[in-house]
Image (cartoon, rainbow, N blue to C red):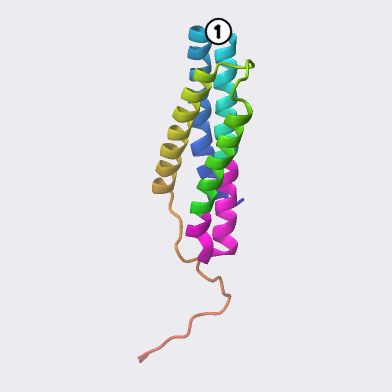
């Protein structure tokens, strides 16, 4: 990944992890150990799903820029589908507190989205990559 992409990934993942840690502590106090586990699992899922999504989207932007917007829409639909599959698989689990999991999942996703939006707005990404040619540009016009 180019350094710009890594910077955006870190600027989104670090606040999400911090909010997840706070959510795990709060859930642990409110719902016990299972609440902390639920918040931890939700934080890991958000970072994993959104991080992989960002990576795939950046690769698509570099290799197939004409598919960027369609890929973004498909990627978000796939993330939602995978999340529903995960929720269905662990619907009646006793491994963790479902309420702590759900709340942390929603809050973590909102924090990731806000942090990623802020990182994109603050980064200075070139819209056109300049060509690095060793030749001097030709002078046009009258030279006196």
Report the residue at 55% width, 35% height from top: 84
Q: Position of residue 42 (x, y in %)?
A: 56, 26
Disc 1: which residue:
32
Res. 48 visible in picture: yes
Quadrant where the C terminus sits is bottom left
Compared to 137, does 78 lie above or below? above
Compared to 134, does 96 lie above or below? above
Res. 21 visible in picture: no
Is 56 contained in the magenta span?
Answer: yes
Compared to 18, does 137 lie above or below? below
Mark 1 lies on a secondary structure that is loop
Quadrant in the rendering for residue 37: top right
Which class describes the residues within 10 Å of circle 1: few (<14), some (14-19), or many (20+)? some
Report the residue at 60% width, 55% height from top: 59
Is 91 contained in the magenta span?
Answer: no
Quadrant in the rendering for residue 117: top left
Q: Position of residue 25 (x, y in %)?
A: 51, 13
* Residue in front for this viewpoint, 62 or 64: 64
Q: Position of residue 23 (x, y in %)?
A: 49, 19
Q: Which span is picked out in magenta?
A: 51-71
Report the residue at 57% width, 61% height from top: 62
Report the residue at 53% width, 10% height from top: 28
Q: Position of residue 130 (x, y in %)?
A: 50, 68
């Amino acid at each position: 990944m180019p350094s710009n992409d890594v910077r955006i990934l870190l600027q989104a993942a670090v606040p999400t992890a911090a909010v997840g840690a706070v959510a795990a502590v709060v859930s642990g106090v409110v719902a016990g150990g299972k609440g902390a586990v639920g918040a931890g699992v939700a934080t890991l899922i958000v970072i994993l799903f959104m991080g992989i999504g960002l990576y795939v989207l950046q690769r698509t932007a570099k290799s197939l820029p004409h598919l960027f917007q369609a890929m973004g829409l498909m990627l978000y639909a796939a993330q939602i589908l995978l999340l529903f599959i995960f929720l269905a698989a662990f619907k009646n689990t006793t491994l963790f507190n479902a309420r702590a999991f759900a709340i942390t999942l929603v809050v973590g996703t909102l924090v990731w989205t806000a942090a990623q939006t802020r990182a994109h707005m603050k980064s200075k990404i070139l819209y056109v990559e300049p060509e690095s040619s060793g030749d001097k540009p030709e002078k046009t016009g009258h030279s006196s």
